[in-house]
Amino acid sequence: MPRNDLSNHFQRREFACKCGCGFDTVDLETLVLLEDIRTHFDVPVTINSGCRCEAYNRKVGGAAASQHLLGRAADIRVQGVDPAEVAEYIETQHPDASVGRYNTFTHVDTRTSGPARWGG
């Protein structure tokens, strides 16, 4: 695996905070979850938002205790797959993962306080 690759399908830069601060450390459990999603659907998974520093999280209106601040969350799009289908897969195959349902993307995280569900 080349130096910037974190796994078979994801590179560190895909998780980097969009402000350019350099925060790009993604939690291993989150990375394993994303690899499973990528492998299951067998199409590219785009990370819309991964790691966020506090300043950037405030700028985008993220929750004060967002899992993005810990590198434990990702907002994703799975190429050609409806976000509701992605959410259903995660909820059934990874019941300990948290899922946020949105019209154009799916939020996933691996918070340690137990799974959360929102959206619809």
Image (cartoon, grey):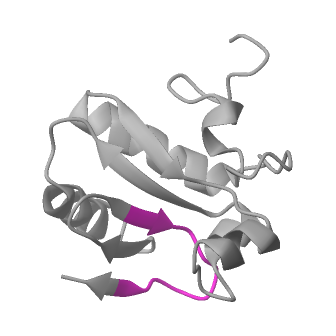
Question: What percent of the width, then of the height, locates residue 68?
Answer: 65, 67
Left of 85 or right of it: where is 8?
A: right
Range shown magenta: 107-117
Q: Image point 36% across, 75% down: which residue?
A: 100
Picture layout, residue 3 above or below residue 104? above
The answer to which of 74 and 33 lies nearer the viewer is: 74
85 or 16, nearer to the observer: 16
In the image, residue 47 above or below residue 79: below
Q: Would you identify the image quadrant in which residue 65 lies?
A: bottom right
Instruction: Looking at this view, name the residue that lies furthest to the top.
Output: 2
Pinpoint residue 38: horizontal percent, then vertical percent.
36, 36
Q: Quadrant of residue 78?
A: top left
Instruction: Please state the horizontal and vertical placement of residue 74, each as a whole percent of the image.
Output: 52, 57
Kindly identify the residue that appears in the image at 26 percent across and 83 percent down. 119
Q: Is residue 79 a member of the stretch shown in magenta?
A: no
Can you say which quadrant of the picture contains the C terminus?
bottom left
> x and y percent of residue 91 in the render?
28, 70
Image quadrant where one finds the N terminus: top right
Q: Residue at x 16, y 64 (%)?
A: 84
State whether residue 68 is above or below residue 4: below
- Above or below, comparing residue 109 to residue 83 in the picture: below
Majority SS type along the magenta span: loop
Number of residue marks: 0
Instruction: Identify the residue shown where x is 14% and y is 57%.
Output: 85
- Between 110 and 10, which is closer to the camera in this rendering? 10
Q: Is residue 67 left or right of residue 108?
A: right
